[in-house]
Amino acid sequence: MTDKNQLNALGREAAFQLADITKTRPQFGAITPRWVARFLEFKGLDAGIFRVNRVVEGDTPLDALCSQDPGKIDIPQGYVEYQTRPREYHLSNISAILNVDTRISDVYSSPYDQIGEQVALAIESLQERQESQLINNDDYGLLKNVADSQRVKPRNRNGAPTPDDLDELLSRVWKQPSCFLAHPKAIAAFQRECTRRGVPPPTTEIAGGVFTLWRGIPLIPTDKLFVDGLKNPKSSSGKTNILLVRTGENKRGVIGLYQAGLPGEQARGLSVRFRGIDDNGLASYLLSLYCSAAVLADDALAVLEDVEIGEYFDYDRDQK
């Protein structure tokens, strides 16, 4: 005698054995859009070294006569002086070795090729590290190369980023500023301050992303501008920095550097080379990424330091 509640039909578990499963490629939440690398202009190098030749600073490169007096003929004479010891940037190397069991790749490569997926994820990992190094590297990182005159502290006692603070950055990088760079939590803190003051900033779409604007300059989110040294802080408060950057060689801004023409090049400055298969059937691949960044002029970069992300406005209290 059968249970009245039991269906007299093929069950889900048995039917599942004949079904094709639709699968995704491997998904990792740690992979980001890497907007910093997208917004920077990159220059390929032939020999891994980039020299920034600067003119010795003055009010103008060369004195000149400006007069309507036809009798004034003492035209200034001189020349434009260059630095005798300009800074040179050397590319740094980010590398990893990827191992793939050939028995696994032979048998389990449908519908997705295992080697291709492993290489793609390894490339993502190196490019994430590149983005972090562009900001935090002890030699060429943007935070380490801000001139002392271009460093600003928040005016708010609690350290929250205000419109006044971003305006101050714009006064330091006023020659064709390109973008602000900030942790998403710092952008949220700035938006809260704007809302509190009744000046909610507009947004715009650039390269498929929607960005907050301040004075027409986009605030680009990146978790590589750490909060208390962390990409993903657990606490609701913490300190971080906000950068304002002018990009491009023609604008004497900040540019990214990479090695051009690498053997096995898979992306800008990144190569993948097969190292062989050992006696146990383990295939090995060497991934190498060569990168750096250069600040062509001191006024191409400014930073708002010690920004507090955890200040919240108590509407009920402040409206009483």
Image (spheres, grey):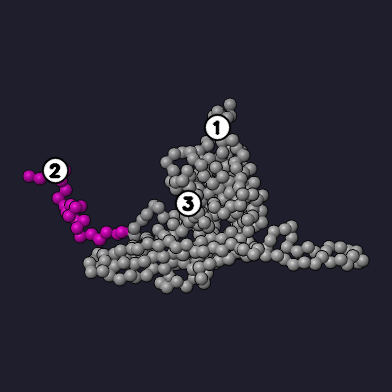
Upstream in sequence: badge 2 or badge 3: 2
Secondary structure under tag 2 reads loop
Amino acid on which the number 1 mark rests in the picture: Tyr
Extreme-top residue of the structure: 320
Upstream in sequence: badge 1 or badge 2: 2
Q: Residue at x 57, y 54 (%)?
A: 145
Q: Residue at x 80, y 67 (%)?
A: 77
Q: Which mark is residue 315?
A: 1
Task: Reply yes or no: does residue 13 show up in magenta.
Answer: yes
Q: Is residue 305 visible?
A: yes
At label 2, counting other C-alpha atoms closer than 10 Å, the crowd grade (few under 14, some 14-19, many 20 or more) is few
Q: Quadrant of the N terminus?
A: top left
What residue sits right under mark 2 in the picture? 4
Amino acid on which the number 2 mark rests in the picture: Lys
What residue sits right under mark 3 in the picture? 224
Extreme-front residue of the structure: 84
At label 3, counting other C-alpha atoms closer than 10 Å, the crowd grade (few under 14, some 14-19, many 20 or more) is many
Distance from Cα at disc 1 to Cα at disc 3: 32 Å
Where does residue 180 sit, x and y in percent of width and height? 57, 52
